[in-house]
Amino acid sequence: MKSNTHRVVNQSQHTIFNPMVKKAINLMLGIGLLSVYACADHTLHLTKSGLNPDNFKSEVNGKSTALYTLVNDNGVEACITNYGGRLVSLMVPDKNGNLTDVVLGHDSIADYINIDGNFGALIGRYGNRIDQGRFTLDGQEYQLPQNNFGHCLHGGPKGFHHVVWDAEQPNDSTLHLTHFSPNGEYGFPGNVKVDVIYTLTHDNAVSITYNATTDAPTILNLTNHSYFNLSGDPSNDICNETIWFDADGFTPIDSTFMTTGEILAVAGTPFDFTTAKPIGKDLSSDNEQLKNGRGYDHNMVLRTPRDTSMPAAILTDSVSGIKMEVFTIEPGIQFYIGNFLDGTVKGKNGIAYPYRSAICLESQHYPDSPNNAQWPSVVIRPGETYRSNCTYKFSTL
């Protein structure tokens, strides 16, 4: 028995030191190490907000989608997909220097396609509502989709928020998006070429610049539909966040959210934010406009002409210490506080977005401007260039 045992041990030693076997073992170890490195490399490619860019690689209507990451020297990160030109995540420092995601959104292209919503999207051809989806331009009447209480909202159910934009990222802090909207698309006249540039600046601002041209008279009102929650915790509502508007008036709405054609003074109403106050302070007021909008869902009429060196709105969160200033050349901002969020939609990291868990501040011309000649015009003609800009600048209290 002793000699047999000895013989087995010797055979094992001989096997281990056989050059061919050693080579095979080394090869297997090498493959294993490569697998480990590949897994580690995959992890390193997650964004600071935890997004996996692979989840944004898809094809929609024959065009490729992707996730683009903008960064600045301060560590701020903005992630944008060319599906709908959507701002997916935005990591900015809180009062303790911790990077905090301040926008709502989804983890994948599949969710953006399958879950209805405008989170972070570019909106066009016409942001907000047009009464009954009809307008007349140069004596010609046009009929648009009626996708919201009988009105046309955000250019129709498949507006710019559902197209795949052509994308080019020339540097770490800039994304250039372009889209061609053909004549007659969703009832709008003119072949329109749209250019949108996202820029993440050195002073922690996301600047969105819009340019467009047309070969026939048309209307344009472009905006961005980001949902902000400065606490960084979208499971909380935003009613305790504080806001200020450089606005003396607002456009009232009826029960279908359509503007009445009037401009009312904010003084003495729950819409007076000329002195900063918590969003929820007057929400329980017995006010017809709050009832019609199910809360705030109104166009704030900014003091004009706009001086873009001065903010049009300032939003702050006392817990995170994050402050957001909004700058725009537009005459209005749509003030919407997530009244239609109800906890059924789950976003990034599987978090359900409850009632009033975000605020939208959408720079714009007034709703239904094509049918209200007394308001700033939204008409653009051949040879003219549509220009707009909105900048969201972040700092701490």
Image: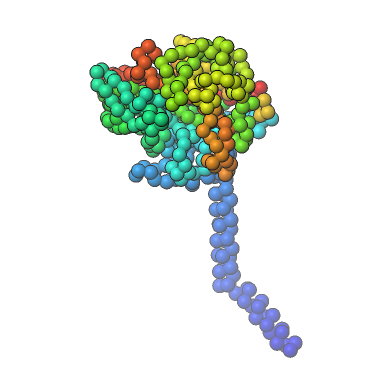
Indicate the quadrant where residue 25 lies: bottom right
- The front one of 252 and 357 is 252
Quadrant placement of the N terminus: bottom right
- The front one of 191 and 132 is 132
Q: Please tell me how many numbered marks the rendered image carries.
A: 0
Residue under the image location 24 percent in, 21 percent down: 140
Q: Is residue 344 above or below residue 383?
A: below
- The front one of 58 and 259 is 259
Residue under the image location 57 percent in, 11 percent down: 268
Quadrant placement of the C terminus: top right
Residue under the image location 38 percent in, 18 percent down: 369
- The front one of 214 and 37 is 214
Residue 55 visible in the displayed image:
yes
On screen, residue 33 versus residue 85, left or right, reads: right
Q: Position of residue 95 (x, y in %)?
A: 67, 27
On screen, residue 196 versus residue 99, left or right, reads: left
Q: Position of residue 281 (x, y in %)?
A: 63, 21
Residue under the image location 71 percent in, 84 percent down: 5
On screen, residue 314 versus residue 199, left or right, reads: right
Q: How is the image coloured?
A: rainbow
Q: Position of residue 246 (x, y in %)?
A: 54, 14
Q: Residue furthest right?
A: 2
Q: Position of residue 360 (x, y in %)?
A: 52, 27
